[in-house]
Image (cartoon, rainbow, N blue to C red):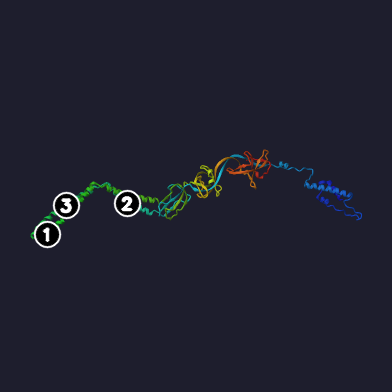
Amino acid sequence: MELNSLEEEKVQGEGASSETRDRVLHLEPATEEPPAQTQKPWHSGGRGVLLGIGLGIALAVIGSRIAVPGQANPDEATPTASTEQSQAPASSVTVDEVETTSVNRTLEATGTVTAFEMLPVMSPATGLQIESVLVDEGDFVKTGQPLVRLDNTILQAQLVQAQASVAQAEARVAELRAGSRGEEIARAKEAVRSAEAGVRQAESDLNLARQRAQRNRTLEAEGAIARDRLDEVLNVERNSQAALDQAKARLGEAKQQLAQLQAGPRPEAIAQGEAQLAQAKGQVQLISAQLNETRVVAPASGEIASREARVGDITSSSKALFEIVQNGRLELQLKVPETQLPQIRPGQSVEIASDADSELKLRGTVREIDPVVDEQSRQAIVKVNLPGGANLKPGMFLRAAIVTSAATGVTAPTEAILPQPDGNAIAYVVQPDNTVKVQTVETGKILPGGRVEIVSGLESGDRIVLKGAAYLKDGDRVEIQGT
């Protein structure tokens, strides 16, 4: 019965169930056993042959099903991989061409922003208190603009005194230059006449005194008068002589004064008066200058880099009140090893970036190379002019790439180059039949405009996948869309 079922399964072919296969593989003996003395082996005789044929057919069917699992029709051919790929829908991508462009060769360096010219601002007046501070750090000032005012109360009082001395000296010089007035000469003449009259009176008194003295000498000789009386008369004579001498002296003085008035002031007197006037004016100028120094002004136009001035501080000759970046001009001082100096020359372009601000991108030029190389670090300072209005501050750290040369090279869009886990990079090159080929590339310098230098792997004119490359594999068919 079991063999007949197996033959039916063979006839039915693929309609056989897995349950029937299990039954074939696990044949069971018949339920009725012959007596022991007449029993033969189950595989002997015609039944054994039929059993062997059935087992062979069953194993063949099972082997065919294992070889092609799930195949509904054993006569149907299995499709090849190339047939499946040709029937897959094309991926939509955009492409760009590999180009030959100019590639700059650069030298990397780091440096610090410094002022092209840093001007310290000192107080010209020392020992004065700061009354007010008029500017702060970051302010841009012009030449002569007041920065600080100092207390000038004492100097103002000294200026008033000096100006009064000038006025007095000017009046004296004016008087000397104008000469004597008529009234003064008239008074001097009157004084001369009075002195002359005094002389005449003194002479008359002296003559009278002499006559009395002569008579009294005779009387005394005759014994008519005492000696004391003679001495009194002689004393009057001597007094009269002295009065005459004084009168003559006054007359001479009056005549001299009159002569001076009539002749005018002496040149020496005028010169002396003018010297006194100049001295008074010089004092005024000195105090005025000291007053001007109480207003500390900017020596040049520029930006206030630092401020040390505080209200209430006392000015000193050793302490700077401000530091000014002249004209706001900054430069970048790069440290470059001496072995790389031959590649650098003034005028070369410099690309500048900042680690602190990724958006900071500047372009400067090499201005000069410091002629001295540091003996410790073996580096020289390369000074780079910075553009204005870049919002840079002295002391900032920047990175720079000095363009040492320019050469022609192959470049491709950065977006089309796909980095790989092993460190390599690939690009998908579009073939004439609109399939793509994976191409390993070696990249070089990152260039502006979203492009990268291709050292090897691509040639100018190659079309490479730009958008959609991440979803492709080698040999895929693509449909090119507009970029």
Mark 1 and mark 3 lie on one chain; the one further toward the N terminus is 3
- Mark 1 is on which residue type? Leu
Residue at which label 1 appears: 230
Residue at which label 3 appears: 199
| Left or right, residue 337 beside residue 439 | left
Mark 3 and mark 2 lie on one chain; the one further toward the N terminus is 2
Q: Position of residue 326 (x, y in %)?
A: 46, 47
Residue 9 at least partly seen: no
| Residue ID at (32%, 48%) | 278
Viewer-proximal residue among 234 and 196: 234
Q: Point out the image quarter for the C terminus.
A: top right
| Residue ID at (13%, 59%) | 231
What is the secondary structure assignment of the residue under circle 2? Answer: helix
| Residue ID at (35%, 50%) | 284
Residue furthest to the front? 375
Q: Which mark is residue 29?
A: none
Viewer-proximal residue among 295 and 43: 43
Mark 1 neighbour density, 10 Å: few (under 14) some (14–19) many (20 or more):
many
Q: Which mark is residue 165?
A: 2
- Mark 3 is on which residue type? Val
Q: CA distance from mark 1 to mark 3?
A: 26 Å
Mark 2 neighbour density, 10 Å: few (under 14) some (14–19) many (20 or more):
some
- Mark 2 is on which residue type? Ser
| Left or right, residue 104 beside residue 314 | right
Residue 149 at least partly seen: yes
Q: Position of residue 311 (x, y in %)?
A: 44, 55
Q: Position of residue 288 (x, y in %)?
A: 37, 50
What is the secondary structure assignment of the residue under circle 1? Answer: helix
Q: CA distance from mark 2 to mark 1?
A: 63 Å
